[in-house]
């Protein structure tokens, strides 16, 4: 049976990929991104630069392993470490905001230019 933390991790990956590449999909996707990206940035800001999906995944990992497992790093840090890329948490936060802001700008520009 698939663990809940694994399902959340896969969902998190899909959301991350959508945040990075969603503006390339369609105009409707851009309209969603124009609302979704600022909402996400505010959520990070009020939650000490931590995604709610990361927190949910960490809580499920603890429950699945009876509190015997160390809390995972941030989602992006975990992905980078799996590829032997080490970056400070401050730079990861900067990159995260930069990527999301870039997606927002690309979406916003496409909505402005392609909407009649």
Image (spheres, rainbow, N blue to C red):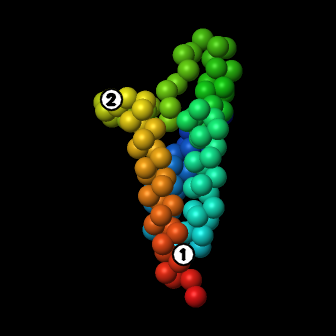
Regarding residue 53, the answer to whether it shows in the image is no
Using a 10 Å C-alpha cutoff, classify the residue at mark 1 as few (fewer than 14 neighbours), some (14 to 19) or many (20 or more). many
Q: Name the residue that disc number 2 marks.
A: 86
| Numbered disc 2: secondary structure | loop
**Residue at 49%, 53% in the rendered image:** 100
Tell me which label, 2 or 1, sits earlier in the chain: 2
Regarding residue 47, the answer to whether it shows in the image is yes
Of 22 and 64, the residue lying toward us: 22
Q: Quick check: 13 above or below 79?
A: below
Residue 35, horizontal then vertical, whole percent: 63, 61
Image quarter hosting the C terminus: bottom right
Q: Is residue 110 left or right of residue 56?
A: left
Of 8 and 44, the residue lying toward us: 44
**Residue at 42%, 32% in the rendered image:** 90
Q: Is residue 92 left or right of residue 74?
A: left
Using a 10 Å C-alpha cutoff, classify the residue at mark 2 as few (fewer than 14 neighbours), some (14 to 19) or many (20 or more). few
Q: Quick check: 106 above or below 48?
A: below
| Numbered disc 1: secondary structure | helix
Check whether the beta carbons of the residues at disc 2 and disc 1 lie within 8 A of each other.
no
Residue 67, horizontal then vertical, whole percent: 64, 13
Disc 2/disc 1 C-alpha distance (Å): 36 Å
Q: Quick check: 24 above or below 66?
A: below
Q: Residue furthest bottom?
A: 116
Q: Name the residue that disc number 1 marks.
A: 111
Counting the numbered discs, the total is 2
């Amino acid at each position: 049976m698939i663990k809940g933390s694994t399902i959340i991790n896969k969902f998190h990956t899909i959301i991350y990929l959508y945040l990075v590449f969603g503006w390339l999909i369609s105009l409707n996707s851009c309209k969603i991104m124009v609302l979704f990206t600022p909402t996400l940035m505010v959520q990070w800001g009020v939650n000490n630069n931590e995604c709610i999906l990361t927190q949910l995944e960490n809580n499920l990992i603890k429950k699945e392993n009876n509190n015997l497992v160390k809390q995972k790093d941030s989602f992006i840090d975990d992905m980078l470490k799996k590829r032997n890329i080490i970056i400070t948490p401050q730079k990861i936060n900067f990159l995260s905001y930069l990527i999301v802001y870039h997606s927002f700008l690309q979406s916003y520009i496409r909505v402005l230019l392609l909407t009649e």
